[in-house]
Image (tube, helix red, strand yellow):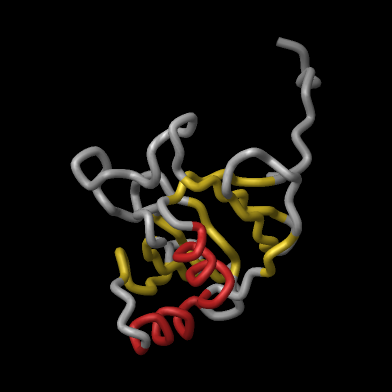
Amino acid sequence: MSATPPIQVQHIDHVTLIVKSVAASREFYVDLLGMREVGRPAFDFVGAWFQAGATLIHLIEEHDRSGPAGFPDQILKKSSRNHHFAFEVVDAYAAAATLKGLGIQLVDDAKTRPDGAVQVFLTDPDGHVVELCTSKP
């Protein structure tokens, strides 16, 4: 292989999730996590797009031509060491306290990684594991 890879990835543009209910996911991603809903093309299926910094979250409501929503418990153990995606927050410890105060069950409570970053894990309404992290100081 050459010293210069043939493709140069710049950044993650979007993550697509299949969900049971766009409305329930909107409550999680917009009302809880503070993302902003943005316009999406006029697809022939229900969905929504949310802006998370420079990254978009594309939601597709489960239908007869999509995959299944979420990860069924019998297939995927809910764990911080499994499929997940992460969002940077100002203070992961404060985020964990807020989530617990709202009665939201955590997959893993806030903890400091060996490199000094802090991470907390929870699930969205469809069981997708979401990490909220704060970079090391």
Outermost residue toward the left in this view: 74
Q: Residue at x 56, y 71 (%)?
A: 134
Front residue (pair 118, 71): 71
Q: Residue at x 47, y 44 (%)?
A: 18
Relative height, residue 66 to residue 32 (above, below): above
Relative height, residue 5 to residue 96 (above, below): above
Q: How many marks?
A: 0
Front residue (pair 38, 132): 38
33 sits left or right of 121 in the view = right
Quadrant of the image containing the N terminus: top right
Give x and y (percent) for residue 105: 29, 73
Front residue (pair 96, 74): 74
Give x and y (percent) for residue 62: 45, 43
Quadrant of the image containing the C terminus: bottom right
Outermost residue toward the bottom in this view: 101
Give x and y (percent) for residue 87: 57, 62
Q: Residue at x 64, y 69 (%)?
A: 35
Give x and y (percent) for residue 68: 38, 38
68 sits left or right of 86 in the view = left
Q: Residue at x 48, y 29 (%)?
A: 65
Outermost residue toward the top in this view: 1
Relative height, residue 53 to residue 74 (above, below): below
99 sits left or right of 1 in the view = left
Outermost residue toward the front in this view: 44
